[in-house]
């Protein structure tokens, strides 16, 4: 079903991000990066941004090592970098011993199983990647005396916040089940953050954690089973959009170019030992409104209510999700800008160029 993964839509995003962050990105000139999960949605953008910097911004290129086991990522997403001398793409499971020769300046741990459908299917692998994989890379970071480490945590660490904690600041401790069907993801990300803060306290490792709130954009596989790809998958294949809840739960969606700006600002900052919400505080929408927006973007699509075949689909499902971005704005100068409709239009443009649609898909 996939015919192409890297294309002009991603290229435009990358150019926009790099021009916006030009001065900050100069800090990374000539450095060595290790990115885990570089074949995934967010990791792929890290690779493309660093490649763009090498081509357009840096006199001395940076070098990039990507560790990826392709459990959910697609080799095609980054195959355009496979013969690039500044990139080394290694098929490697980060939960196994990681040894790399030579210096490393920056480590990004984006490897995880991020889609609820898939982390419920692979709960142990999810925990291993968020804890053991993370610990392997933190140890490597200490050994290599790196400049900065970025851990991908999640807004899911807040669980289902009480109404008075919406919008949710980083200081909220969370309302999370430790045994429910989402716990493999939520609790291992929580332990991941605990590891990070203690590597900072005990070893002085310059680590930061980001807590993304529902990032979307080109590169997010249409069969990923997260809500936006799912709705597009229905709509672009000429089917009704299927709402698997009563439509009332909300999420705050953040377009990838805004989110990448936040992630880059975090890893290139001096805010060691800190965690940051990264999302869009203006884009909280209900699932019903999201379905209507995607129906309008694609055109002439109906929305229907359906029960999920997965009996755990709605168990511990947060009712509202909206970030308080005060800390991120103040310390990182992060301000999201892309609206929902513009983001959806870009997403559709990418889906249409990356996949073939029609009956039977
Ligand atoms: N996209 C979002 O909205 C969002 C929200 C919150 C948190 N996050 C976090 O951000 C990170 C990136 O998410 P994404 O949306 O790009 O997910 P993704 O599934 O597209 O990418 C993750 C990548 O990690 C790889 N991977 C998984 N386990 C691995 C292992 N053991 N060794 C090597 N590679 C492995 C997968 O093959 C995949 O390519 C994840 O840690 C995720 O939990 C994402």
Image (spheres, helix red, strand yellow):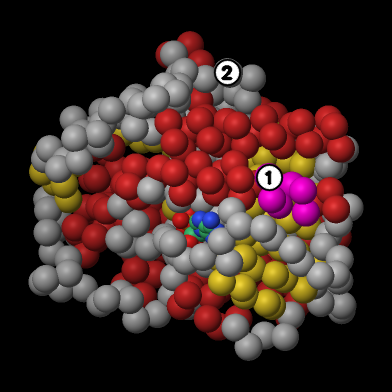
Going 15% across and 43% down the picture, which residue do you hit?
309
Q: What residue is disc 2 on?
A: 173
User: Hey, which quadrant is residue 27 in on the image?
Assistant: bottom right
Q: Nearer the viewer, residue 293 or 114?
A: 114
The answer to whether the beta carbon of the residue marked 2 is less than 8 Å from any atom of ligand 1 is: no
- In this view, 154 is above or below 339: above
Residue 159, percent from left and from top: 45, 25
Q: Secondary structure at mark 2?
A: loop
Q: Nearer the viewer, residue 67 or 173?
A: 67
Looking at the image, which is closer to me, 181 or 163? 181
Residue at 59 percent across and 53 percent down: it is 95
Q: Is residue 341 left or right of residue 296?
A: right
- Range of magenta residues: 135-140
Question: Quick one: SS at disc 1?
Answer: helix
Q: Nearer the viewer, residue 141 or 78?
A: 141
**Which x, y percent locates residue 228?**
33, 51
Most frequent secondary structure within the magenta stretch: helix
Q: Quadrant of the C terminus?
A: bottom left
Ligand 1 within 8 Å of disc 1? The answer is no
Residue at the spot of label 1: 135
Q: Which mark is residue 158?
A: none
Question: Is 277 on the left or on the right of 216, as rendered?
Answer: right
Q: Position of residue 104 (x, y in %)?
A: 82, 62
Task: In the displayed orientation, state which residue is furthest to the front.
Answer: 97
- N-terminal-most mark, 1 or 2: 1
Measuring from the top left, give residue 317's x and y in whole percent. 33, 29
Q: From the viewer's perspective, is residue 280 above or below residue 22?
A: above
- Residue 31 visible to an observer of this rendering: no
> Is residue 39 magenta-colored?
no
Q: Residues within 10 Å of mark 2 (few under 14, many from 20)?
A: few
Q: Residue at point 60% right, 31% down?
A: 191
């Amino acid at each position: 079903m996939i015919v192409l993964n890297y294309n002009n839509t991603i290229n435009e995003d990358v150019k926009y991000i790099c021009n916006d962050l030009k001065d900050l990105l100069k800090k990374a000139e000539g450095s060595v990066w290790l990115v885990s999960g570089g074949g995934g949605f967010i990791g792929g953008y890290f690779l493309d941004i660093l490649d763009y910097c090498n081509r357009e911004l840096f006199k001395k290129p940076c070098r990039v090592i990507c560790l990826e086991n392709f459990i959910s990522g697609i080799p095609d997403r980054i195959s355009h970098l496979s013969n690039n001398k500044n990139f080394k793409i290694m098929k490697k499971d980060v939960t196994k011993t990681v040894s790399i020769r030579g210096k490393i300046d920056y480590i990004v741990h984006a490897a995880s199983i991020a889609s609820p459908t898939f982390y419920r299917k692979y709960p142990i692998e999810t925990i291993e990647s968020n804890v053991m994989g993370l610990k392997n890379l933190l140890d490597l970071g200490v050994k290599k005396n790196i400049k900065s480490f970025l851990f991908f945590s999640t807004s899911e660490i807040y669980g289902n916040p009480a109404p008075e904690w919406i919008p949710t600041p980083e200081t909220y401790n969370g309302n999370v089940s430790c045994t429910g069907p989402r716990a493999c993801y939520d609790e291992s990300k929580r332990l991941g953050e605990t590891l990070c803060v203690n590597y900072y306290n005990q070893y002085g490792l310059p680590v930061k954690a980001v807590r993304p709130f529902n990032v979307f954009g080109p590169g997010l596989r249409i069969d990923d089973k997260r809500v936006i790809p799912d709705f597009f998958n229905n709509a672009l294949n000429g089917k009704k959009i299927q709402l698997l809840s009563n439509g009332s739960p909300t999420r705050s969606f953040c377009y990838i170019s805004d989110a990448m700006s936040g992630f880059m600002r975090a890893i290139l900052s001096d805010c060691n030992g800190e965690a940051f919400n990264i999302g869009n505080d203006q884009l909280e929408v209900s699932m019903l409104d999201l379905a209507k927006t995607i129906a309008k973007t694609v055109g002439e699509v109906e929305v229907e209510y359906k029960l999920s075949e997965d009996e755990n689909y709605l168990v511990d499902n947060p009712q509202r999700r909206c970030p308080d971005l005060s800390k991120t704005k103040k310390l990182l100068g992060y301000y999201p800008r892309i609206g929902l409709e513009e983001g959806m239009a870009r997403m559709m443009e990418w889906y249409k160029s990356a996949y073939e649609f029609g009956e039977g898909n």
